[in-house]
Protein backbone atom coordinates (compact mmCIF):
# COMPACT_ATOMS: atom_id res chain seq x y z
CA UNK A 1 0.00 0.00 0.00
CA UNK A 2 1.35 3.42 -0.99
CA UNK A 3 0.90 6.32 1.40
CA UNK A 4 -1.10 9.34 0.10
CA UNK A 5 1.93 11.47 1.01
CA UNK A 6 3.41 10.46 -2.35
CA UNK A 7 0.88 12.80 -3.96
CA UNK A 8 2.48 15.72 -2.11
CA UNK A 9 5.89 14.73 -3.46
CA UNK A 10 4.51 14.45 -7.00
CA UNK A 11 2.98 17.92 -6.70
CA UNK A 12 6.27 19.36 -5.46
CA UNK A 13 8.08 18.05 -8.55
CA UNK A 14 5.20 19.03 -10.88
CA UNK A 15 4.33 15.42 -11.78
CA UNK A 16 0.75 14.96 -12.96
CA UNK A 17 -1.12 12.43 -10.84
CA UNK A 18 -4.14 10.27 -11.57
CA UNK A 19 -5.58 8.19 -8.74
CA UNK A 20 -8.18 5.45 -9.16
CA UNK A 21 -10.48 4.91 -6.18
CA UNK A 22 -11.07 1.19 -5.61
CA UNK A 23 -12.63 1.22 -2.16
CA UNK A 24 -13.58 3.49 0.75
CA UNK A 25 -10.38 3.32 2.81
CA UNK A 26 -9.82 7.09 2.50
CA UNK A 27 -13.13 7.50 4.34
CA UNK A 28 -13.44 4.47 6.61
CA UNK A 29 -11.07 2.46 8.82
CA UNK A 30 -12.84 -0.73 7.73
CA UNK A 31 -13.21 0.20 4.09
CA UNK A 32 -16.93 -0.60 3.80
CA UNK A 33 -18.71 2.36 5.49
CA UNK A 34 -20.32 0.05 8.06
CA UNK A 35 -20.39 0.52 11.84
CA UNK A 36 -17.38 -1.44 13.19
CA UNK A 37 -17.02 -2.88 9.69
CA UNK A 38 -20.00 -5.21 10.03
CA UNK A 39 -23.01 -3.40 11.49
CA UNK A 40 -25.52 -1.15 9.79
CA UNK A 41 -24.59 1.70 7.45
CA UNK A 42 -22.43 4.35 9.11
CA UNK A 43 -24.05 7.78 8.90
CA UNK A 44 -21.87 9.38 11.58
CA UNK A 45 -18.11 8.74 11.15
CA UNK A 46 -16.13 8.02 14.31
CA UNK A 47 -13.45 10.38 15.61
CA UNK A 48 -10.69 8.32 13.98
CA UNK A 49 -12.53 8.24 10.65
CA UNK A 50 -13.04 12.02 10.77
CA UNK A 51 -9.30 12.51 11.30
CA UNK A 52 -8.63 10.03 8.48
CA UNK A 53 -10.90 11.96 6.11
CA UNK A 54 -9.34 15.30 7.00
CA UNK A 55 -5.78 14.12 6.34
CA UNK A 56 -6.66 12.31 3.14
CA UNK A 57 -8.72 15.26 1.95
CA UNK A 58 -5.69 17.52 2.22
CA UNK A 59 -3.52 15.06 0.31
CA UNK A 60 -6.18 14.63 -2.40
CA UNK A 61 -5.85 18.32 -3.27
CA UNK A 62 -2.53 17.40 -4.89
CA UNK A 63 -4.12 14.80 -7.20
CA UNK A 64 -4.87 16.13 -10.68
CA UNK A 65 -7.56 13.59 -11.56
CA UNK A 66 -9.65 11.07 -9.63
CA UNK A 67 -11.38 8.10 -11.21
CA UNK A 68 -13.71 5.49 -9.73
CA UNK A 69 -15.18 2.18 -11.00
CA UNK A 70 -18.79 3.39 -10.58
CA UNK A 71 -20.81 6.60 -10.49
CA UNK A 72 -22.04 5.74 -6.98
CA UNK A 73 -18.50 5.52 -5.58
CA UNK A 74 -17.57 8.75 -7.34
CA UNK A 75 -20.59 10.53 -5.86
CA UNK A 76 -19.68 9.45 -2.32
CA UNK A 77 -16.18 10.92 -2.69
CA UNK A 78 -17.45 14.06 -4.43
CA UNK A 79 -19.83 14.77 -1.56
CA UNK A 80 -17.04 14.27 1.00
CA UNK A 81 -14.12 16.01 -0.70
CA UNK A 82 -15.87 18.29 -3.23
CA UNK A 83 -13.86 16.87 -6.10
CA UNK A 84 -14.96 15.80 -9.57
CA UNK A 85 -14.52 12.07 -10.10
CA UNK A 86 -14.51 10.44 -13.54
CA UNK A 87 -16.18 7.04 -13.85
CA UNK A 88 -14.17 4.35 -15.64
CA UNK A 89 -15.73 0.94 -15.13
CA UNK A 90 -13.72 -2.16 -14.34
CA UNK A 91 -13.10 -4.67 -17.11
CA UNK A 92 -12.67 -8.41 -17.57
CA UNK A 93 -10.64 -10.46 -20.01
CA UNK A 94 -12.71 -12.75 -22.22
CA UNK A 95 -12.85 -14.35 -25.64
CA UNK A 96 -16.25 -13.74 -27.15
CA UNK A 97 -16.10 -17.02 -29.09
CA UNK A 98 -15.74 -18.95 -25.84
CA UNK A 99 -18.58 -16.98 -24.24
CA UNK A 100 -20.81 -17.81 -27.20
CA UNK A 101 -19.97 -21.51 -26.79
CA UNK A 102 -21.00 -21.38 -23.13
CA UNK A 103 -24.24 -19.63 -24.12
CA UNK A 104 -25.00 -22.30 -26.73
CA UNK A 105 -24.40 -25.08 -24.22
CA UNK A 106 -26.52 -23.48 -21.49
CA UNK A 107 -29.33 -22.61 -23.90
CA UNK A 108 -29.61 -26.21 -25.04
CA UNK A 109 -29.51 -27.67 -21.52
CA UNK A 110 -32.10 -25.30 -20.01
CA UNK A 111 -35.06 -26.82 -21.87
CA UNK A 112 -35.06 -30.12 -19.99
CA UNK A 113 -33.53 -28.82 -16.76
CA UNK A 114 -35.20 -30.11 -13.58
CA UNK A 115 -32.87 -28.69 -10.91
CA UNK A 116 -31.71 -25.06 -11.08
CA UNK A 117 -28.51 -23.92 -9.41
CA UNK A 118 -28.06 -20.57 -7.70
CA UNK A 119 -24.52 -19.52 -6.83
CA UNK A 120 -22.96 -17.01 -4.45
CA UNK A 121 -19.26 -16.14 -4.67
CA UNK A 122 -17.40 -13.76 -2.36
CA UNK A 123 -16.74 -13.00 1.27
CA UNK A 124 -18.86 -15.20 3.54
CA UNK A 125 -19.90 -12.29 5.74
CA UNK A 126 -22.89 -10.36 7.04
CA UNK A 127 -22.33 -7.15 5.09
CA UNK A 128 -22.25 -9.23 1.90
CA UNK A 129 -25.73 -10.51 2.75
CA UNK A 130 -24.85 -14.19 3.11
CA UNK A 131 -26.99 -14.73 6.22
CA UNK A 132 -29.92 -12.95 4.52
CA UNK A 133 -29.52 -15.14 1.43
CA UNK A 134 -29.46 -18.41 3.37
CA UNK A 135 -32.50 -17.45 5.47
CA UNK A 136 -34.48 -16.49 2.36
CA UNK A 137 -33.44 -19.64 0.52
CA UNK A 138 -34.35 -21.98 3.40
CA UNK A 139 -37.76 -20.30 3.75
CA UNK A 140 -38.64 -20.95 0.10
CA UNK A 141 -39.05 -24.72 0.42
CA UNK A 142 -38.46 -25.21 -3.31
CA UNK A 143 -37.20 -28.67 -4.18
CA UNK A 144 -36.16 -27.67 -7.70
CA UNK A 145 -33.43 -25.20 -6.62
CA UNK A 146 -29.96 -25.64 -5.14
CA UNK A 147 -27.78 -22.96 -3.51
CA UNK A 148 -24.01 -23.16 -4.03
CA UNK A 149 -21.66 -20.89 -2.07
CA UNK A 150 -17.92 -20.29 -2.52
CA UNK A 151 -15.55 -18.09 -0.53
CA UNK A 152 -14.20 -17.53 2.96
CA UNK A 153 -15.19 -15.30 5.85
CA UNK A 154 -16.59 -15.01 9.39
CA UNK A 155 -19.90 -16.76 8.57
CA UNK A 156 -18.34 -19.96 7.21
CA UNK A 157 -19.51 -21.99 10.22
CA UNK A 158 -23.09 -20.82 9.59
CA UNK A 159 -22.88 -21.87 5.94
CA UNK A 160 -21.33 -25.24 6.82
CA UNK A 161 -24.05 -25.88 9.38
CA UNK A 162 -26.80 -25.25 6.83
CA UNK A 163 -24.97 -27.28 4.19
CA UNK A 164 -24.85 -30.22 6.62
CA UNK A 165 -28.56 -30.00 7.46
CA UNK A 166 -29.96 -29.02 4.08
CA UNK A 167 -29.28 -31.26 1.04
CA UNK A 168 -30.02 -28.31 -1.28
CA UNK A 169 -27.18 -26.13 0.10
CA UNK A 170 -23.56 -26.74 -0.96
CA UNK A 171 -20.42 -25.02 0.36
CA UNK A 172 -17.35 -25.19 -1.90
CA UNK A 173 -14.82 -23.22 0.18
CA UNK A 174 -12.35 -20.91 -1.51
CA UNK A 175 -11.88 -21.71 -5.21
CA UNK A 176 -9.07 -20.89 -7.62
CA UNK A 177 -9.97 -19.19 -10.90
CA UNK A 178 -10.20 -22.43 -12.87
CA UNK A 179 -12.49 -24.15 -10.37
CA UNK A 180 -14.55 -20.99 -9.98
CA UNK A 181 -15.21 -20.75 -13.71
CA UNK A 182 -16.19 -24.44 -13.74
CA UNK A 183 -18.70 -23.84 -10.94
CA UNK A 184 -20.14 -20.76 -12.65
CA UNK A 185 -20.60 -22.65 -15.91
CA UNK A 186 -22.55 -25.33 -14.06
CA UNK A 187 -24.89 -22.81 -12.39
CA UNK A 188 -27.83 -20.84 -13.76
CA UNK A 189 -28.15 -17.62 -11.75
CA UNK A 190 -25.67 -15.66 -9.62
CA UNK A 191 -26.97 -14.09 -6.41
CA UNK A 192 -25.19 -10.96 -5.19
CA UNK A 193 -27.10 -9.87 -2.04
CA UNK A 194 -24.62 -7.22 -0.81
CA UNK A 195 -25.90 -5.06 2.02
CA UNK A 196 -23.38 -2.29 1.43
CA UNK A 197 -22.45 0.09 -1.38
CA UNK A 198 -20.18 -2.11 -3.48
CA UNK A 199 -17.62 0.10 -5.27
CA UNK A 200 -18.25 -2.01 -8.38
CA UNK A 201 -19.05 -5.71 -8.02
CA UNK A 202 -16.57 -7.56 -10.21
CA UNK A 203 -18.24 -10.93 -9.61
CA UNK A 204 -21.06 -9.68 -11.85
CA UNK A 205 -18.62 -9.63 -14.79
CA UNK A 206 -17.55 -13.17 -13.93
CA UNK A 207 -21.23 -14.14 -14.10
CA UNK A 208 -21.69 -12.44 -17.47
CA UNK A 209 -18.53 -14.09 -18.77
CA UNK A 210 -20.04 -17.45 -17.83
CA UNK A 211 -23.46 -16.48 -19.24
CA UNK A 212 -25.75 -16.10 -16.27
CA UNK A 213 -28.06 -13.32 -15.01
CA UNK A 214 -27.54 -11.75 -11.59
CA UNK A 215 -30.03 -11.35 -8.75
CA UNK A 216 -28.80 -8.42 -6.63
CA UNK A 217 -29.74 -5.74 -4.13
CA UNK A 218 -28.38 -3.15 -6.54
CA UNK A 219 -26.42 -1.33 -3.82
CA UNK A 220 -23.49 0.81 -4.92
CA UNK A 221 -22.10 0.06 -8.35
CA UNK A 222 -24.20 -3.10 -8.65
CA UNK A 223 -27.20 -1.07 -9.75
CA UNK A 224 -25.18 0.36 -12.64
CA UNK A 225 -23.94 -2.90 -14.10
CA UNK A 226 -27.09 -5.02 -13.65
CA UNK A 227 -30.09 -3.99 -15.77
CA UNK A 228 -33.27 -4.88 -13.90
CA UNK A 229 -35.22 -7.69 -15.59
CA UNK A 230 -32.75 -7.64 -18.51
CA UNK A 231 -29.34 -8.86 -17.33
CA UNK A 232 -30.58 -9.56 -13.84
CA UNK A 233 -33.17 -8.82 -11.18
CA UNK A 234 -32.80 -5.96 -8.68
CA UNK A 235 -34.35 -6.92 -5.34
CA UNK A 236 -36.72 -4.67 -3.41
CA UNK A 237 -35.76 -5.32 0.20
CA UNK A 238 -38.94 -3.64 1.44
CA UNK A 239 -40.84 -6.57 -0.07
CA UNK A 240 -40.60 -9.68 2.12
CA UNK A 241 -41.19 -11.91 -0.90
CA UNK A 242 -38.72 -10.17 -3.20
CA UNK A 243 -36.31 -13.12 -3.34
CA UNK A 244 -39.08 -15.57 -4.20
CA UNK A 245 -40.33 -13.24 -6.93
CA UNK A 246 -36.82 -12.99 -8.37
CA UNK A 247 -36.50 -16.76 -8.57
CA UNK A 248 -39.94 -17.13 -10.11
CA UNK A 249 -39.04 -14.51 -12.73
CA UNK A 250 -36.31 -16.79 -14.07
CA UNK A 251 -36.95 -20.34 -12.92
CA UNK A 252 -40.69 -20.43 -13.61
CA UNK A 253 -40.23 -18.91 -17.05
CA UNK A 254 -37.39 -20.53 -18.97
CA UNK A 255 -37.92 -18.06 -21.80
CA UNK A 256 -36.83 -15.23 -19.48
CA UNK A 257 -33.71 -17.16 -18.61
CA UNK A 258 -32.94 -17.71 -22.31
CA UNK A 259 -33.46 -14.00 -23.02
CA UNK A 260 -31.09 -13.11 -20.21
CA UNK A 261 -28.34 -15.21 -21.79
CA UNK A 262 -28.40 -12.99 -24.88
CA UNK A 263 -28.60 -9.83 -22.78
CA UNK A 264 -25.62 -10.62 -20.54
CA UNK A 265 -23.40 -11.50 -23.52
CA UNK A 266 -24.33 -8.20 -25.17
CA UNK A 267 -23.63 -6.22 -22.00
CA UNK A 268 -20.36 -8.06 -21.38
CA UNK A 269 -18.89 -6.33 -24.45
CA UNK A 270 -19.14 -3.00 -22.62
CA UNK A 271 -16.63 -4.27 -20.06
CA UNK A 272 -13.84 -5.44 -22.35
CA UNK A 273 -10.22 -4.62 -21.54
CA UNK A 274 -9.97 -2.76 -24.84
CA UNK A 275 -12.75 -0.35 -23.85
CA UNK A 276 -11.25 0.25 -20.42
CA UNK A 277 -7.80 0.91 -21.90
CA UNK A 278 -9.21 3.43 -24.37
CA UNK A 279 -11.11 5.21 -21.58
CA UNK A 280 -7.95 5.55 -19.48
CA UNK A 281 -5.85 6.66 -22.46
CA UNK A 282 -8.41 9.33 -23.34
CA UNK A 283 -8.25 10.63 -19.78
CA UNK A 284 -4.43 10.63 -19.75
CA UNK A 285 -4.36 12.57 -23.03
CA UNK A 286 -6.57 15.26 -21.53
Image (spheres, rainbow, N blue to C red):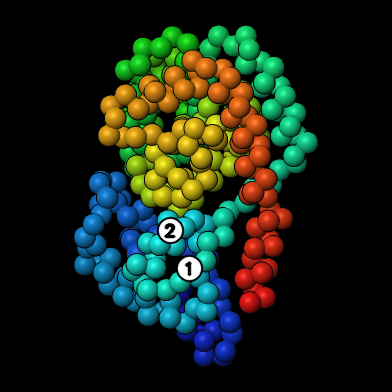
Q: Residues within 10 Å of mark 2 (few under 14, many from 20)?
A: many
Image quadrant where one finds the C terminus? bottom right
Please name the residue shown 28% across and 65% down the image: 49
SS for tag 2?
helix
Q: Is residue 199 left or right of residue 45?
A: right
Between 282 and 33, which is closer to the camera in this rendering?
Answer: 282
Between 120 and 140, which is closer to the camera in this rendering?
Answer: 140
Quarter of the figure with residue 157? top left
Asked if marks 2 and 1 touch (Cβ < 8 Å), the reply is: yes
Q: Is residue 233 left or right of residue 139?
A: right
- Coordinates of residue 128 in the picture (x, y in percent): 38, 40
Please name the residue shown 58% across and 82% down the image: 16
Regarding residue 181, the answer to whether it shows in the image is no
Please name the residue shown 42% across and 73% down the image: 83
Between 206 and 220, which is closer to the camera in this rendering?
Answer: 220
- Coordinates of residue 211 in the picture (x, y in percent): 63, 31
Q: Is residue 103 left or right of residue 250?
A: right
- Coordinates of residue 163 in the picture (x, y in percent): 41, 19
Q: Height in image: 23 above or below 284?
A: above
* Res 85 label: 1
- Coordinates of residue 183 in the picture (x, y in percent): 59, 27
Quarter of the figure with residue 61? bottom left
Please name the residue shown 61% across and 23% down the image: 258
Which comes sooner in the sequence, label 2 or label 1?
Answer: 2
SS for tag 1?
strand
* Res 248 label: none
Q: Height in image: 15 above or below 91?
A: below
Regarding residue 271, the answer to whether it shows in the image is yes
Q: Height in image: 286 above or below 76?
A: below
Reading the image, the residue beneath label 2 is 73
Amino acid sequence: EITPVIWNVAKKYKIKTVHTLRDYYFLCLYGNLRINGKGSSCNAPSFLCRIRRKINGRCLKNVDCLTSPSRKTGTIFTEEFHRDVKTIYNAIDFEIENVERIKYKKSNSIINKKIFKLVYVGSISEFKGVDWLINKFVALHREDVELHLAGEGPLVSLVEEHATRNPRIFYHGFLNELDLNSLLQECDVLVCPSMWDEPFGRIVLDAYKNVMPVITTGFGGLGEIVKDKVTGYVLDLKDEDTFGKALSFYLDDKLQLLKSFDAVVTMLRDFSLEKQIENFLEMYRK
